Image (cartoon, helix red, strand yellow):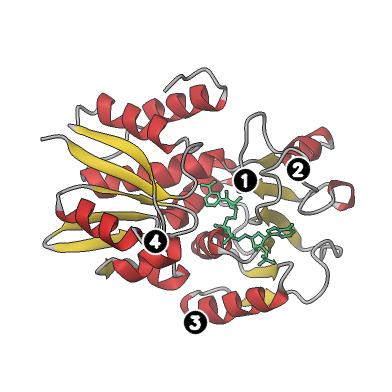
Amino acid sequence: MTRLLALLGDPVEHSLSPVFQNAALEAEGVDARYLALRCSGEDLPGLLRGIARAGGAGNVTVPHKAAAAAIVEAPSAAVRLTGACNTFWHEGGVIHGDNTDVAGAHDALRHHFGSRFEGGRAVVLGAGGASRAVILALDTLGVRGIEVRNRTVARARALVKALAPGVSLTELHAFQGPMDASLEPSVSLVVNATTLGLGPDDPSPYPVEELPDTVALHDLVYRPGETRWVREARARGIEAFDGREMLLRQGMAAFERWCGRPAPEEVMRQALRRAAAGEYEG
Ligand SMILES: NC(=O)c1ccc[n+]([C@@H]2O[C@H](COP(=O)([O-])OP(=O)(O)OC[C@H]3O[C@@H](n4cnc5c(N)ncnc54)[C@H](OP(=O)(O)O)[C@@H]3O)[C@@H](O)[C@H]2O)c1
């Protein structure tokens, strides 16, 4: 019987996940289909539980990740710390939930930068779910200090309060000044975990002309043709990557939770590359 893997969220129409998850399932000979289902908050509990108990599994995306964290019966440590669940499956009679954005951010940062931020300091722009995931990832990569800057400072403070007990960072601060205030010379990485950059005309999350040459950028946002922030930084000779690698890596981690086997990285990477280039008609 074909297994249903569903992406639950709203909107879901433009998600690239069905493209690379279906490519992976096909390559691995798994009898399952991954479908994007637009669903309301009201319908989420019934759909998630019903799909999982029928032997299916899936992902949860905006705006339902926090709601899903409260629905799953066996949340992972990443779900408990971030308060967000993006992956669910049924195993041993219970619905499990994980937040593979944490593993995705970790693996993408490791892929792009290796271990060179160990003992270093970073600035994370934004204080939503993605920010929490990337902070946990930076913590496991051995980053020593993180300053969280957010338009709404109260949200950055709440994030620090929630995460501080669960991390080994020696410094985790909510920044009280403007998002684009200057960077301490010891900061070697700036991460964009805001939604700025999703639109082609969005302002930069941090002005590229103010960045020191030695800093590296990781933009969690991705869009066809790179984000403006990444393009402008590269034009200035600054090392910068968008969120596509994280998207791939969180998807690989989800595949592994659902199927209990390693994800076919090259198949998924190629499918994502084709989709991002607009060559895929799926
Ligand atoms: N690459 C990946 O795999 C991956 C995975 C997850 C998320 N993401 C991306 O990460 C981004 C954040 O996602 P999320 O789930 O954390 O979203 P979220 O929980 O809605 O948080 C959005 C963040 O963006 C800030 N923001 C929104 N509009 C802004 C503006 N005009 N100026 C300054 N700040 C603004 C918000 O600040 P306030 O608190 O002040 O509203 C908040 O900090 C999204 O673009 C998403 O696509 C990528």
- Badge 3 or badge 1: first in the primary sequence: 3
| Residue 78 visible in rendering | no
Find out if the beta carbon at label 1 lies less than 8 Å from the nearest ligand 1 atom.
yes
- Label 2, label 4: how many angstroms apart (C-alpha)? 28 Å
- Badge 4 or badge 1: first in the primary sequence: 4
Please, what secondary structure does the residue beneath circle 3 have?
Answer: helix
Say which residue label 4 marks: 85
Say which residue label 2 marks: 229
Amino acid residing under circle 3: Pro
Say which residue label 1 marks: 221
- Label 2, label 1: how many angstroms apart (C-alpha)? 10 Å
Amino acid residing under circle 1: Val
Q: Position of residue 176 (x, y in %)?
A: 78, 77
Q: Give whichever of 203, 51 is nearer the camera.
A: 51
Please, what secondary structure does the residue beneath circle 1 have?
Answer: loop
Residue at figure coordinates x 32%, y 30% from the top left? 22
